[in-house]
Image (cartoon, helix red, strand yellow):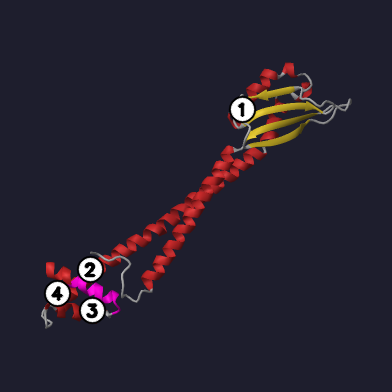
Amino acid sequence: EELRGHLVTSTNEFISKGYSEEDAQHEAINQFDDGTDMLKDLHKALNESKKDNEKLNKKFINIFRNIFILSLIVGLATMVYADRLVDKVEYLAYDLRGKLYKAGIEDRIDKPETYKKQFENILKDKEFKYIRFANITLASEEKPIYRYSDNSNQTKSMAMRGVSLGIPDKNGRSAQLDLGIDYRPVLRAGSFFNGVFYVGVLSLIIYIVLLVRYKFKLKKTLIYKKA
């Protein structure tokens, strides 16, 4: 077994120097024996070593293939989630307006003292959890008549969205609803998707390079050589 190991190592060294597989076998034998008595054993040992290395090469290559497939699945799932999250944020003002209409707040929009608690209870709903502040401003006034804040002191990564509340009445009075929406979940989903995308592309490139090298190496050198 020890001699066989030396012969395999020696043969691989000759192959790396440019010898054909058969010539490398003969050169390795000639270092230990001037004849060919051990040629059968050497062929057997080399074939076993070659098969082991081929299996190891395939496993190594398939790791990157599996990483690419996993990245593709995770990336698609993240993209779908991010798109839904963006849609939710973009239409949040319209959804809230619908809730205000349903609650009858539109009819008394110029009297915030009558709907303050009702408005805040609506904002406690799970679908409005990303709203950080809200202002209601009458068209005829510059300053908001009603302000809401969740006291999160959130100033960065904020999306500003506005929507009109109702049709101007006979006195020309209408209101504007302005929301400050936490945009960080959308940004985090986008960053995660970018990370998955780059991992997938890199693993695909490595997979293709190793696959090409393995398939077109003319069976002279191995990607991985056992010591």
Q: CA distance from mark 3 to mark 4?
A: 15 Å
Q: Earlier in the sequence, mark 1 or mark 2?
A: 2
Query: For mark 2, what is the residue?
Result: 49
Is disc 1 in contact with disc 2, using a CB cutoff of under 8 Å? no
Q: Residue at x 77, y 18 (%)?
A: 111
Q: Earlier in the sequence, mark 3 or mark 4?
A: 3
Q: Residue at x 53, y 50 (%)?
A: 194
Q: CA distance from mark 2 to mark 4?
A: 12 Å
Q: CA distance from mark 1 to mark 3?
A: 74 Å
Residue 215 position, x and y percent, is 37, 72
Residue 1 in sight in this render: no
Query: For mark 1, what is the residue?
Result: 153
Is disc 3 in contact with disc 4, using a CB cutoff of under 8 Å? no
Q: Is residue 138 left or right of residue 210?
A: right
Amino acid at the residue labelled 2: Ser
Q: Is residue 177 left or right of residue 40?
A: right
